[in-house]
Image (cartoon, helix red, strand yellow):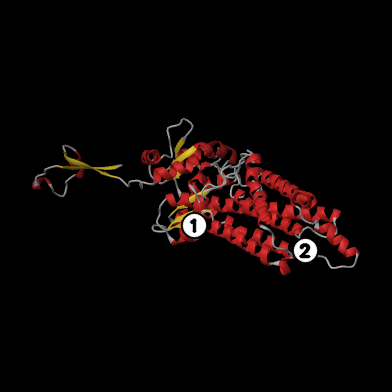
Amino acid sequence: LRTILLAFKDIDAIQIGDDFDELQLINSLVMIGMVGIEDPLRPDVPEAIKMCNRAGITVRMVTGDNLITAKAIASKCGIITGEKYELILDSQKFNQLIRDKKGNFDQDLFDKVWPKLKVLARSSPSDKYVLVNGILNTNLPEKQIVAVTGDGTNDAPALKRADVGFAMGLTGTDIAKEACDIIITDDNFSNIVKAICWGRNVYDSISKFIQFQLTVNFSAILLSIITPVFFDGNVFKASQLLWVNLVMDTLASLALATDSPTPDLLNRKPYNRNKSLLSKNMCVFIAFHTFYQVTVILIIVFLGPTLFSFDNEFYLNHYLETIGSATINTSHTTFIFNIFVIMQIFNEINARKVHGERNVFSNIFVNKIFIAIILLTICVQVLIIQFGYGLFHVVPLSPELWMYSILIGFSVLIYHQLVVINVP
């Protein structure tokens, strides 16, 4: 709060001459009142700061205001909480702490200051750049990702140097907007939190698709390697693999990439910049589900004719080839193909979570596109099995085999609940 004191003093006109000293007005003034001028915080800023803290993001204030004003504003919006380790410095003290006796910047000295720094007052344009550059070049074990907000021309170097630069759309200068990566059109800090939320959502969407696609790819590759060892030919026909590939690439990417951001995305710490895109949880998911799918299909390959009372197509076609007759398609390989595709459909639901969560149905009905793609895939699969004989080398399945296909496919949801592990 900036204050202005209003006061007056009666002076005779005779007293005002060429030799009148204005310093005489300082004494014996009569106070009229006091006016307080404040640039209030936006109502949503404190909550946005809390969300950043919850998400593992440290917010630091770098301002040209004096130390008292900066400290008051930082306290109101939640940047400082009164902890002993928090540093609140002005530019002069800051530069004393980070420079050696010759006045040169010292990274080791800087690394002792910046982790605890919360407010930097009376800062110059160079201070902001030094802060950003020093954090990015830190010698500490954990490398940081730095985002900077600014609106002035003198903020441009820091905006350009940061990993992500946010410029104000309403009050920002053209130079600041050109130097930044993202322009906040309404100058609202809470939109930075939304940008972070969307960024994490995009990252998770990529992870979902990767773990789903690798599971399908590894399963199909292993089956294509194992079955020819025992039989002449592959367990899947080329046209069937093309449909599986369409499910994996096009439809799955649309389904898994359309989940909207949720507040839960801000309940975890940021990823390290050196962290692999393939996390431990994803590796566990891929390994366990690949093992399960391959095991189920191999059981159907070898024991399916006995369990479900149909001809073994591999043995039958081998016999037909030996007598010079044309090979035929039976319920055996059609059943295998149908189970494999249905397992992918249900596993697509499992793939919606990449951090070891058990509730794979959370907010599933909010994403209308995901539901539509799942239903579309099921409808196309039914048409392929019942009417795609010539193109996909299948035969229509009986209602009983359809029921078994759905039950076996659904089992991947139950299996996921048994093996899901949240790896730190």
- Which mark identifies residue 55? none
Q: Residue at x 65, y 60 (%)?
A: 247
Q: Secondary structure at mark 2?
A: loop
Q: Which amino acid is tagged 2?
A: Asn
Vertical placement of residue 37 versus 80, above or below: below
Give whichever of 245, 189 is nearer the camera.
245
Q: Is residue 21 left or right of residue 184?
A: left
Q: Is residue 418 left or right of residue 73?
A: right
Asked whether the residues under the numbered discs 1 and 2 touch, taking CB atoms below 8 Å apart as contact, a structural biologist would say: no
Q: Residue at x 67, y 45 (%)?
A: 285
Spatial CA distance of label 1 from label 2 is 57 Å
Residue furthest to the top in view is: 84
The percent coordinates of residue 394 (x first, y second) are: 73, 63
Q: Residue at x 91, y 63 (%)?
A: 322
The residue at which mark 2 appears reads as 329
Determine crowd level at label 2: few under 14, some 14-19, many 20+ residues with C-alpha closer than 10 A: some
The residue at which mark 1 appears reads as 182
Q: Residue at x 75, y 49 (%)?
A: 307
Q: Quarter of the image for the N terminus: give it.
A: top left
Q: Quarter of the image for the C terminus: give it.
A: top right
Q: Is residue 319 left or right of residue 256?
A: right
Is residue 277 among what the camera can see?
no
